[in-house]
Image (spheres, rainbow, N blue to C red):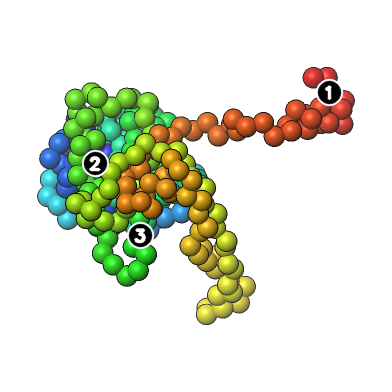
């Protein structure tokens, strides 16, 4: 059993090593992660320049570890295509410091690393813990234990091969967690504030993301985590809308405009 462990918070993030430590008890762990924080880079892969991979001395003994000067998705691709050809059984991404709920999954490096595993036909799991609302501790114990249970299930062949699982936990000690729910993606929307950053040079701007407006509709990932529960959302990569906006009429108008027969 070989488990690939990665993240988007960077190779020295606490959550990554808490995850590796737990999974080391179950199988061989390979850690490969960006050399710096890459939160929010989404599914980005580096194709325009070479990427340096450095073998590092891991903070926990006996774990082969690499830092990549690239993205979370790059890290998984290098792991599967270069460092551990055809021998990875499970991909785990996290433990991310900060939740990945609702449409966060579309920009999340944590989820995107798991997505690369999923594209390669491996059971792949993204694990995130909500950020504290006030200054506080980042609790990873429950997330690490949950990863351990999932690892054991994978070891026994009890995880489906075609699995992309997005797990979010409240930022609570294990004993205070209120349950576990299968959820669907909720809706949250951000208002991005733009600030000029002229500390070094004029013409530089920053995108500031504030707390999103959330819809806590029952059965969603947001709803579960806000109630102190663990949220399990099964994802797939087909973004085709199941709803039906007036796209048929648009198609007709386009075919008329372009004089193409439908
Ligand atoms: Mn992150």
Q: Residues within 10 Å of mark 2 (few under 14, many from 20)?
A: many
Asked if disc 2 and disc 3 are in contact, CB closer than 8 Å, the reply is no
Q: Earlier in the sequence, mark 2 or mark 1?
A: 2
Give the label, 2 or 3, closer to the camera.
3
Up the image or down, 73 lies above or below 191; here it is above
Residue closer to the observer: 221 or 51 = 221
For label 1, being within 8 Å of ligand 1 is answered no
Residue receiving disc 2:
147
**In terms of image quadrants, where is residue 160?**
top left
Residue 67 visible in rendering: no
State which tag comes first along the sequence, 3 or 1. 3
* Residue 12, position as x, y percentages in the image: 27, 58
Distance Cα–Cα, label 2 vs label 3: 19 Å
Q: Nearer the viewer, residue 8 or 66?
A: 8
Position of the N terminus by quadrant:
top left
Is residue 130 at least partly visible in the picture? Answer: yes
Task: Tell me if mark 1 has few (under 14), some (14-19) or many (20+) residues whose alpha carbon lies within 10 angstroms of its own.
Answer: few
On the image, numbered disc 1 is attached to which residue?
260
Q: Please indicate whether residue 240 sits to the left or right of residue 35 in the image.
A: right
Q: Give the residue at the far top of this rendering.
A: 261
Which of pointers 2 and 3 lies earlier in the amino acid sequence? 3
Q: Which residue is mark 3?
A: 131
Q: State the separation of the CA atoms marked 2 and 1.
A: 53 Å
At 24% from the left and 41% from the top, the residue drawn is 147
Query: Cα distance, mark 3 to mark 1?
Result: 52 Å
Percent coordinates x, y for residue 226 in the rendering: 38, 53
């Amino acid at each position: 059993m070989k488990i690939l462990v990665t993240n988007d918070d960077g190779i020295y993030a606490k959550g990554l090593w808490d995850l590796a430590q737990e999974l080391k008890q179950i199988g061989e762990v390979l850690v490969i992660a960006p050399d710096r924080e890459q939160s929010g880079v989404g599914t980005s892969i580096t194709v325009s320049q070479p990427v340096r991979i450095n073998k590092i001395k891991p903070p926990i003994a006996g774990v082969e570890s690499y830092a990549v000067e690239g993205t979370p998705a790059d890290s998984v691709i290098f792991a599967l295509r270069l460092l551990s050809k055809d021998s990875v059984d499970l991909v785990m991404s996290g433990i991310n410091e900060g939740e990945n709920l609702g449409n966060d999954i579309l920009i999340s490096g944590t989820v995107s690393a798991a997505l690369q595993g999923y594209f390669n036909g491996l059971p792949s799991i993204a694990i995130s813990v909500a950020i504290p609302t006030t200054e506080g501790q980042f609790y990873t114990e429950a997330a690490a234990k949950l990863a351990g249970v999932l690892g054991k299930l994978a070891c026994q062949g009890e995880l489906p091969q075609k699995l992309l699982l997005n797990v979010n936990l409240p930022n609570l000690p294990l004993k205070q967690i209120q349950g576990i729910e299968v959820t669907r993606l909720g809706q949250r929307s951000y208002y991005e504030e733009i600030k000029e950053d002229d500390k070094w040079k004029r013409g530089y701007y920053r995108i500031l993301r504030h707390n999103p407006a959330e819809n806590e509709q029952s059965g969603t990932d947001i709803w579960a985590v806000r109630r102190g529960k663990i949220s399990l959302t099964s994802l797939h990569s087909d973004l085709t809308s199941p709803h039906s906006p007036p796209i048929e009429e648009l198609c007709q108008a386009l075919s008329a405009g372009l004089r193409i027969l439908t």
